[in-house]
Image: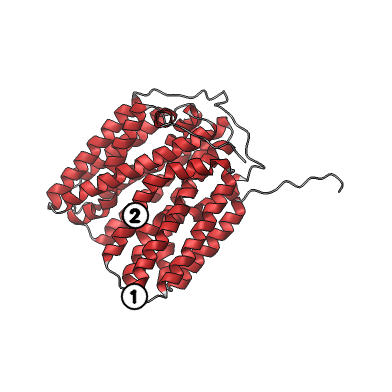
Amino acid sequence: MSTTTKLRPRDLVRASGGPRYAAALAVDALGTGLLRPFLLLYGVTVLGLSAPATGVAMTIGIVAALACTPAVGWWLDRGARSTVVAASMLVRVLGVALLLAAPAGNVWMFTAAALFLGIGNQAWPAAHAALVATVAHGRDRDAALATSRALRNAGMGAGALLAIAFLAGGAAAMQALAAVTGLAYLAAAALTWSVHLRADPAGVQGGEPTEGPAPRMGTLLAANVVYSFCLNVPEIALPLILVTHLDASPVWSAVVFVANTVLVVTLQIPVTVFMSRYSREAVLAFGGIVLSASYLGFLAATVLGHGWAAPAVALVSVACTLGEILYAGSSTALVTALAPPRAMGRALARFQLSTGLGLAVSPAVITALAALGPAALWGGLTAATLVSAGAVAPKRRVSGRGR
């Protein structure tokens, strides 16, 4: 077992990069919440693109952005930290600028904007985790990563709520929304740049022993592709099942999404700190078991009558969110603990590549399975997640004496 960490709020801010960096994270998250959930609407409403063309353009941008993650890892392993985080914010400013400059009907400029926004969104997680791993170590690092995730979800939720007020204003309001987002990214980049944090690429940054036998990164990365599906369950799988299979009001989808955001914001830090008494591998495997149980719960809820099915799905979504919290609180921290300091950036970039791949393919997989029925969707997700949990579970060392 590991020692449980106890940190005061001031310690958490310091371990997360300091007050200026915390402010940058908040501003960046607010800007992301303003635009990211409504990018599709921007293409359709402001630029007059068809929904299929807008969706394809966004997919191309996201997938192409994944190809940039190895370069981010190489840059981080050269010692850069705050510079890479600031760059991930600045490249999104360019994406917003392309959105504002794109004439109506121009799908290529919209695709380019989605590409630059995607590059920033894919580069940020690895760069941020590397920065936190430089200023915090051991279980303090885990708590700091959990703190930043809670802060980011809170900022994105607040930004999304503010953006709802813009949606009734039509195309002009959407353009104003994009402009405010660009300014938020620019301010966040300036704050991050002012931190001036670098790592010594030749030194050991608070190296710590791995917890038990280190799992092969290939196994961990493959499992992470499946684990990352849980991040799209509240946004894609549950609305799809609630509306198309259960004929429930879309309000239930909103309830599930809001509950997920609130629970992540309020529980991510305390749950991560509490679970720090166990190995990260064990917590990650347990998170997979909780997710699998929630998927079976969703399957059971679908057989209830229409009057009870939607409330049951909303209730089970709490367990799904808990599994997501366990996964998010242990996975990135496990990578930072396993990776040698000189290869920290490349390890985090590979991990982000697997996460991005899971997020990119999960909408297509989820919708394809849902078309076959709830049993295929939830049964398939349960089986895949249980296999992944078994793959990352800590393995007991077997002594060779007396054999």
Q: Residue furthest right?
A: 402
Q: What residue lies at 45% left-to-right and 49% top-to-bottom?
A: 325
Frontmost residue, 189 versus 166: 166
* Mark earlier in primary sequence (1, 2): 2
Query: CA–CA distance between discs 1 and 2?
Result: 21 Å
Q: Where residue 258 appears, x then y in whole percent?
A: 31, 54
- Label 1 element class: helix
Helix or strand or loop: what does disc 2 sit on? helix
- Looking at the image, which residue is at 45% across and 27% down? 80
Instruction: Bin the neighbour count of mark 2 within 10 Å (Cα to Cα): few under 14, some 14-19, many 20 and up.
Output: some
Give the left or right position of residue 105, taking residue 245 as reference. left
User: Which residue corresponds to mark 1?
Assistant: 306
Q: Quadrant of residue 374?
A: bottom left
Please give the residue where the numbered disc 2 appears in the rendered image: 259
Q: Position of residue 302 (x, y in %)?
A: 41, 72
For the question of whether residue 36 can be seen, the reply is yes
The quadrant in which residue 240 appears is: bottom left
